[in-house]
């Protein structure tokens, strides 16, 4: 089996390829969350093209919908659709738009406006409890997104209903579109906030695929409580000049930058 | 007045009873409330079907988002909350999580329009038709009486797509039981050749009163249509009225901006029909407060007021 580390690098190459071609995309965030998606889809979730219609499938809702390039690349790799379709990313009339849409096979829910994924996931998790099903619900959120009040309504409800079949993941890269999250509207301490709401919280290295796999396989963190995984990540991870640099929130590389990025990733592959 | 019209229950009560009837056989039916089971007359439902009621507390955004998530798993979900909060605070969840993702949630706006009259503008919903009409993939329905409410709830429960239903909380008369109800098709409750009164929701009853008065005092025959579905509009019926050139008076418990009247006017004009036309509703001003009836009376939404507006419209049409 191909190693997760190798997959992560290949996913990064494809994310950059399609963003570069489309001249649009959320580069930094897609690079920060892709290891999480890699582990979920390749090691943890029971969902794929063969069972996407099954009521028993695990569910993934991407609340931070703008980092859709990472999701599309991973869904293509899972066989939901041919990767060549991503050549049409953000082109007129394409289903491969800048946010998740159910017109793309494998996408659970249309998202894009922040602060929606957790409530949707709570609904799915309540249904799972009502029907005594074993599926799990995962949702990926941004740390900047936590300023949306609707998240806290959903956080209350998740604990109230003891949704231990729900796992929220925060792509904690500490940068948002205009400045570091702490400067825009400080959402720290995230762990303490969720703990006080009745969640079980764990903080992990969001780029360590082994740790991520071990964490997700150990869910629920505590029986009877929703789980929050705060994944410490680096925006722009994997490309030297993009890491922790604000402009790469939705920056598109020039030809020279693109070639350098691909070379860095090729070197990383060789170094494995 | 229509002395023969008998009083029924509040549409709210019929809604609750109908949901209980459906829940007896449909275990996939779920009611989601935002601390609104009392005001939604859903306490009996909660007692009979405790596993089919999900309470989310006073959190309307969450109410709609959770409802969409539940519906995505195959549940038939009724999200119940006062119309004022449901269609304003959670508008983005309605737009994205329900309509855009096409999750089959029935949004039920209780105590709609000015039903909470004396509580003031925070509790009025005079914007909901306008807001939801502009969202793709949404049926917008205001049943007039118990018959329409029961049918609307049953048909929404059988729908695979989003529906919005709104009604008030005071007892409503039974207008007609012999005219079938389908979303998107106006119910002709009274035939007439001189003009048409198109009313929706709880203004249909005073429109019927007005038609009776016009006949009694003026010998005029006014057609009355319950336009229970504001979207999709019954364009077949409107086209017929357009071709006949009948003067049209619309009546609604909604702002005159963006509701039934403007929807009908836009359709007619774009079809090159230039009927004499007038919209009755709540004007664009700070709404007076008082009971629903007080507010209706203030704005002339009663039999005599609608009859007067109808005569003015007919006079204007003659002069033109």
Image: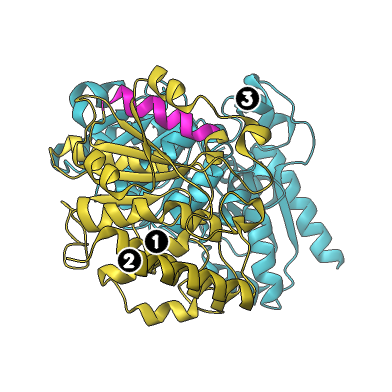
Instruction: State whether residue B177 is above or below residue B10.
Output: below
- Residue B205 is at least partly visible in this image: no
Q: Which residue is mark 1?
A: A71
The quarter of the rendered structure image containing the N terminus of chain B is top right
Tell which subunit mark 3 falls on.
Answer: B
Tell me whether the residue at label 2 lies in contact with that at label 3, contact meaning CB atoms closer than 8 angstroms: no
Residue receiving disc 3? B117
**Mark 1 and 2 residues: CB-CB less than 8 Å, in contact?**
yes
Please tell me if label 1 and label 3 are on a single chain. Answer: no
Distance between mark 1 and mark 3 Cα atoms: 48 Å
Span colored in magenta: A149-162
Q: Nearer the viewer, mark 1 or mark 3?
A: 1
Residue A133 position within the rendered picture, expressed as x and y whole percent measured from the top left: 13, 42
Percent coordinates x, y for residue B278 in the rendering: 74, 55
Q: Where residue B174 sits in the image (x, y, percent)?
A: 41, 39
> Label 2 is found on which chain of the structure?
A
Q: Colour of chain B?
A: cyan
x 35%, y 70%: residue: A270
Front one among A115 and B267: A115
The extreme top residue here reads A196
Q: Secondary structure at mark 3?
A: helix
B210 and B274: which one is in front? B274
Shade of chain A as shown in the rendered figure: yellow
Q: Is residue B64 magenta?
A: no
Closer to viewer: mark 2 or mark 3: 2
Local SS, label 1 = helix
Give the alpha-carbon distance from disc 1 to disc 2, as whole Å: 6 Å
* Residue at image location 40% in from the left, 29% down from the top: A155
Q: Which residue is identified by label 2?
A: A75
């Amino acid at each position: 089996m191909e190693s997760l580390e190798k997959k992560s690098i290949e996913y990064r190459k494809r994310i950059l390829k399609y963003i570069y071609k489309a001249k649009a995309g959320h580069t930094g965030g897609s690079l920060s969350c892709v290891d999480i998606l890699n582990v979920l889809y390749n090691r943890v979730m029971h969902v794929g093209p063969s069972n996407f219609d099954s009521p028993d499938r695990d569910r993934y809702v991407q609340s931070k919908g703008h980092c859709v390039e990472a999701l599309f690349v991973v869904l293509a790799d899972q066989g939901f659709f041919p990767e060549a379709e991503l050549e049409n990313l953000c082109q007129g009339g394409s289903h491969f738009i800048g946010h998740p849409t159910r017109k793309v096979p494998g996408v659970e829910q249309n998202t894009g406006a922040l602060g929606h994924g957790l409530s949707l996931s709570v609904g799915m998790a309540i249904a799972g409890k009502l029907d005594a099903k074993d599926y799990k619900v995962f949702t990926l959120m941004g740390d900047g997104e936590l300023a949306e009040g609707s998240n806290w309504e959903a956080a209350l409800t998740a604990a109230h209903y003891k949704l231990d079949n729900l796992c929220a993941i925060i792509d904690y890269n500490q940068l948002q579109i205009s400045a570091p999250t702490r400067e825009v509207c400080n959402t720290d301490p995230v762990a303490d906030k969720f703990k006080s709401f009745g969640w079980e919280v764990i903080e992990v290295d969001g780029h360590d695929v082994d740790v991520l796999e071990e964490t997700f396989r150990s869910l629920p963190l505590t029986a009877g409580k929703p789980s929050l995984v705060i994944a410490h990540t680096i925006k722009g991870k994997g490309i030297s000049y993009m890491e922790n640099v604000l402009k790469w929130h939705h920056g598109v590389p020039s030809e020279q930058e693109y070639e350098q990025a691909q070379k860095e990733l090729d070197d990383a592959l060789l170094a494995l | 007045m229509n002395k023969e019209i008998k009083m029924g229950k509040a549409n709210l009560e019929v809604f609750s009873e109908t949901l209980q009837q459906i829940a007896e056989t449909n275990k996939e039916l779920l009611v989601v409330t935002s601390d609104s089971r009392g005001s939604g007359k859903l306490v009996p439902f909660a007692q009979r079907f405790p596993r089919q009621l999900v309470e989310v507390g006073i959190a309307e955004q969450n109410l709609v988002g959770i409802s969409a998530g539940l519906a995505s798993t195959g549940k038939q979900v009724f999200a119940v909350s006062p119309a004022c909060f449901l269609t304003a605070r959670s508008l983005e969840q309605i737009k994205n999580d329900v309509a855009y993702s096409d999750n089959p949630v029935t949004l039920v706006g209780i105590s709609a329009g000015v039903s909470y009259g004396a509580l003031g503008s925070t509790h009025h919903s005079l914007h909901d038709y306008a807001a939801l009409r502009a969202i793709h993939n949404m049926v917008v329905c205001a049943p007039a009486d118990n018959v329409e409410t029961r049918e609307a709830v049953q048909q929404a429960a059988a729908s695979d797509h989003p529906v919005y239903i709104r009604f008030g909380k005071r007892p409503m008369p039974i207008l007609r039981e012999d005219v079938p109800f389908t979303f998107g098709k106006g119910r002709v409750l009274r035939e007439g050749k001189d003009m048409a009164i198109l009313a929706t929701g709880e203004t249909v009853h005073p429109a019927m009163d007005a038609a009776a008065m016009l006949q009694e005092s003026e010998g005029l025959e006014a057609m009355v249509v319950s336009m229970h579905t504001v979207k999709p509009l019954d364009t077949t019926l409107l086209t017929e009225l357009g071709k006949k050139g009948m003067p049209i008076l619309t009546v609604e418990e909604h702002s005159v901006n963006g509701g039934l009247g403007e929807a009908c006017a836009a359709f007619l004009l774009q079809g090159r029909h230039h009927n004499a036309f007038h919209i009755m509703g709540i004007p664009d001003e700070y709404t007076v407060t008082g009971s629903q009836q007080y507010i209706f009376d203030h704005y002339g939404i009663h039999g005599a007021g609608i009859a007067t507006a109808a005569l003015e419209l007919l006079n204007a049409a003659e002069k033109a």
